[in-house]
Amino acid sequence: MRRWLRYLAVAITAATVVLGVAAVVMLVVAESRGVPRPSEAWAGLLLLLAGLAPACVGLLVALRRPHARVAWILIGGAFSVALVMTADTVAGLALYEDPESAVGRWATVVGEEWPVLFVWPLALAYVFPDGRLPSPRWRPVAVLAAVSAIGVLVLIFLAPELEGPYGTVPTPLPFELDEGIFLPVFWTCWVGLLLSLFGGAAAMRARYRAGGPDQRRQILWLAYGALLVPLWLGGGWLLSWLIGPAFYVLDGIALVTFQVWPAVAVAVAVTRHGLYSIDRLFNRTVVYAVLTAVLAGTYAVVALAVGMLAGGSALSASVATLAAALAFRPLRDAVQTIVDRRFARARFDAVRLMRGFLDDVRDGRAEPEAVGAVMRLALGDPTAEVLFRLSETGAYADHRGRLHDEVPGDERARSAIGRELGILLHAPVLARGPDVLHAVLAAAAVPVELARLRVELRLQLAEVESSRARIAQAGYAERRRIERDLHDGAQQRLVTLGIVLRRMQRSLPREARLLGPAFDAAVDEVAGAISDLRTIAAGVRPPRLDEGLAAALADLARGAGVPVEVTASSDRAPPEVEAAAYFVACEALTNAVKHGSPTRIVVRTAREDGLLDLLVADDGVGGAAPSTGSGLPGMADRVAAQGGTMTVDSPPGAGTRIAVRLPCAS
């Protein structure tokens, strides 16, 4: 059975092709003989060629699935259109040669069956894409459509008079129906056929609402063709009314589209190639069709009002054009929002979420770096991740500032955000529905740019902090080197020189004892130089720091000149951290004694969780201003160079409290 069905499909398709070729040949013959139907001949040729599209698609589907109803609707529809158009061509030739030609009359009867142009797409609307009705409840509607269509076609065939190419042609049938019976039945069937058109649209809507994502897009492909026809016919009528009858050719193009597009929809539904671009295509068509109609109405109303008030066609046209231009953008946004809310709810919700996030960012209620989390929510993809492209290096970084020399090579798909702002890693399934994805990417461009700049700035600041820490460590190492050079170099040489001078003094003969005071003076100068060098070395780095920060602070407290209570942790920290804490404490004590007039100073240190805390508090006059002088700003710079923080609390009359926290993980 399946084999015979395939043979039958091939035979009908071949017959359709033969009819089409025959019609083309007869059209050429008609042109050569001067048959006065050039425009209709051109339209007929176009329709015949267009009829080959459903025939070919139907044959391909029938060869794969011989029992598919959709395939037989395409094949039968293409054959009926080819038969009717070929008969119309034959009628034109035969009746031009002989107005009483029997062949011409019978061809006119068949050629008048033009409703077949709409019947087979209507049948497809009821059963597309799986060949079944949306539900059993649609059987009465389908029966009404079938009875109405068959009734119209049969009654046209039985009509007492026919509208031929050159006037009225009497029926070739041996009998005639009474018009009192014919007309009421015909118009009843005709009204039923018109109602069936609305039923086909309702059937597609019902299947769309009940179907999954793939089936919905399949329905949209077929509905798009049905939408184009009234838009094109209406547009052609409007242009013909405004410009002239030359644009009636658009009506013919719309009819051709109505024959070709269902075949395109079936081909897409079968192959699923390009299936998902229909969302955007359908959306944009509806938006711009409504927008065109509203702008045309705006133009007409403004032009009419200005013409009535001020007169002058040039002025009214200029003002109407200006009004339409000013209204274009707000009208487009409003229409796009309405269409998205109705026909693209997922896209509408996703864009609304992204725009709400952008408003929160502008108002300071959200951080731009959270754009990745918002995009995950908008796309419904928990695996989505945003990587920002750094303009300086071309590398990528996430919202935490972690660098990626290359994009992670996992199974996720990649989509660019803006012009080299970053990329979105997402589930590959999102690429199959790009309408929502593209809308989210476009809406995320501004927050992604803000987040990218902030991440890049944080990375640069981190590099500056790291550079400052390296400079501080290099300075600390240099101070230790100078201290060692002073202790092991110049100081030792001076000590040796003093010993040598004493030995020379003791070895002087009796008669040279007069030089003793001079040697004593020289040794005293050497001792003074050694003391100065020790003071300088202690200023570079106190020697007691080698024993720990607690020992160095204890020595510092003994020479402060006021009572200093020191409570220091014995836990050791890295040398550069202990040096920074010591010099901060030294500067704080100096400032307190010099400017605060305290009676008591407290110095405490503690190490916990990788941090070294230093507190210097006094009971002096307070009022220390961090922005004045060089002491407190210098202390802050020294702390910041180690990646730490410093806070100063110095209310007037209540003393000064300086708290320092330094990272010291080791």
Image (cartoon, rainbow, N blue to C red):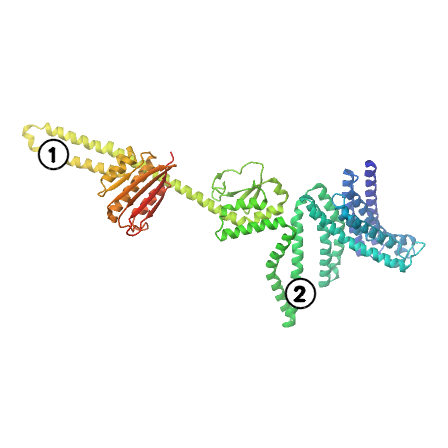
Please provide percent x and percent y for residue 655.
28, 48
Determine crowd level at label 1: few under 14, some 14-19, many 20+ residues with C-alpha closer than 10 A: some
Image quadrant occupied by the C terminus? top left
Please provide percent x and percent y for residue 580.
32, 39
Assess whether mark 1 and mark 2 are in contact (beta carbons under 8 angstroms): no
Q: What amino acid is found at the position of numbered circle 2 in the picture?
A: Ala
Residue at the disc numbered 2: 300
Q: Residue furthest left?
A: 511
Q: Residue furthest right?
A: 174
> Which mark, residue 520?
1
Residue 128 or residue 205, whichever sits in front: 205
Q: What amino acid is found at the position of numbered circle 1 in the picture?
A: Asp
Q: Earlier in the sequence, mark 2 or mark 1?
A: 2
Does dot 1 land on a helix, a strand or a loop?
Answer: helix
Q: Residue at x 15, y 36 (%)?
A: 525
Residue 103 or residue 603, whichever sits in front: 603
One can see residue 24 in this view = no
Does dot 2 land on a helix, a strand or a loop?
Answer: helix
- The answer to which quarter of the image holds residue 333 is bottom right
Q: Is residue 109 above or below residue 566?
A: below
Q: Is residue 36 above or below residue 378?
A: below
Residue 237 is left or right of residue 338, and the answer is right
Residue 201 or residue 616, whichever sits in front: 616
Determine crowd level at label 2: few under 14, some 14-19, many 20+ residues with C-alpha closer than 10 A: some
Residue 170 is left or right of residue 530, and the answer is right
Image quadrant occupied by the N terminus? top right
Residue 93 is left or right of residue 472, and the answer is right
> Which mark, residue 229?
none
- The answer to which quarter of the image holds residue 335 is bottom right
Distance from disc 2 to disc 1, alpha carbons, whole Å, reads 117 Å
One can see residue 388 in this view = yes
